[in-house]
Amino acid sequence: MSRSITIAKAGLPPGPKGTLIGGNISQIGPRRVDFFLDLARTYGSIASFRAGRWRLFLVSDPELIQQVLVTDARHYIKHFGARAFKPILGNGLVTSEGGFWLSQRRLMQPAFLKAQVLSYAPIMAELANAMVSKWSPGQAVDLEYEFSILTSAIALKTLFGLDDRGDHEGVYRSLMEAFDLLTIRLDATFTLPIFFPTPANIKIRRAVARVIDLIDDFIARGRSRPLGNDLLSTMIMAQREDGSRMTDQQLRDEAMTLYLAGYETTALTLTWSWYLLSQHPSAERKLADEWARVLGGRTPTASDLAALPYTAAVINEAMRLYPPVYAIGREATTDLELGGYRVKRGYTILMSQWVSHRDPKYFPEPERFLPERWLDGLATRLPKFAYYPFGGGQRLCIGSHFATMEAAIVLAAVGQKYGFTIAPDAVIDIKPQITLPPKYGMPATLELR
């Protein structure tokens, strides 16, 4: 169907000049979030740049973001950056499109209803307490690693109904290797299709195969026991209107997607939360006071969360400054209009939470860690897409309530017993992939409360 569009501005939005072949790739660099932030601050709410053969618009105005993710959503698909991770994510909810995506989303939605999600709170608390019981005061730990192992165990239990019997370190290492290799491939100016047996492609295929083998093992073990309250059981039993169910391949792709999303994003939220708290002792004291007043040392439950507003504020502020996913992109499937400019078919619209969450119009002193900003109803006053750590529109993360509940329960369960001092010689930096992990981990020392 043809669409009538009105173009008010000729040419491309403003942006930096690039080279003939690579465009702006050399300017983007490994800390691409700095490039995005500088782009928005220099050129405004819609800016243009090029990465190799890809033409991109960086959009930071909430109304324009809403136009892409909601109003014109049916005319966009996931962009090349998201598709680059298909070797590991398959055709799950993050990467699938159109009618297939909608069918899968509807099929999986019951697994994330409020009552179902709340039923997982005791598992989260139990496994957090089990982790803490293995710690000792003065012990040196890597917070990213510790929380990744914990959230992996929570994901295995809630997704597959499996106890902590698997090789979580093997899962963690294999996933990190696969993500690193795929990110390097995404950043390259020129690559051959992944089926070509280049040394780099062979390494990627081997790393992905190891992850797939692990997930297949989880599914096989989950299938081998009676159906229960876990997400895998829900997905196995889920039926479409015509009575059909997921194929084994669909089950694997969705399980892979949910496992990765379910463990890594929450682990990163917890890691960056504790990093920020370690740098702001007054905020940590307020948090500890809230836990002492409401919980008195007992294990938090889902019903406690409404009485822990400062805990929620800390998590919101950590996700503002260090959003687990720092950018999302959409590729136009037809010619469109955005901000008065023509978006040609094949152009990519990039929207960066890292940029939007640092807009001083909505977040005064944007680089400052200030949980208090969330205590006076800020979330209800913000434009819809000024703060969007879980994306938005019809493709809002299906596990957003799961993730925020898990982060709050683990933060309170762990924080009542231990605080953390970041190693004084630690180099803290970010490593943008599809998510935003710390580049060199998060070395810390445990301090008993």
Image (cartoon, rainbow, N blue to C red):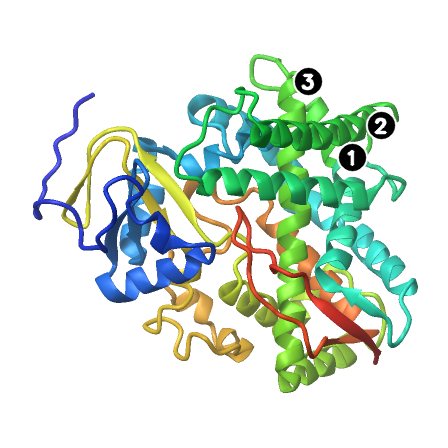
Q: Which residue is drawn at 75% across and 27% down?
A: 213
User: Who comes first in sequence, dot 1 or dot 2?
Assistant: 1
Q: Is mark 1 in CB contact (under 8 Å) with mark 2?
A: yes
Disc 1 residue crowd, few under 14, some 14–19, many 20+, Cα 10 Å: many
- Between marks 1 and 3, how big is the CA–CA gap? 14 Å
Is residue 246 something that shows in the picture? no
> x, y (%) of residue 6?
9, 40
Q: Name the residue under label 1.
A: 160
- Mark 3 secondary-structure assignment: helix
Q: Name the residue under label 3.
A: 248
Q: Which of these two is toward me, 150 or 407? A: 150
Amino acid under label 2? Answer: Arg
- Mark 2 secondary-structure assignment: helix
The quadrant in which the C terminus is found is bottom right
Disc 2 residue crowd, few under 14, some 14–19, many 20+, Cα 10 Å: few
Q: Residue at x 82, y 36 (%)?
A: 161
Amino acid under label 3? Answer: Asp
Amino acid under label 1? Answer: Phe
- Report the disc number at residue 19: none
Q: Mark 2 points at which residue?
A: 221
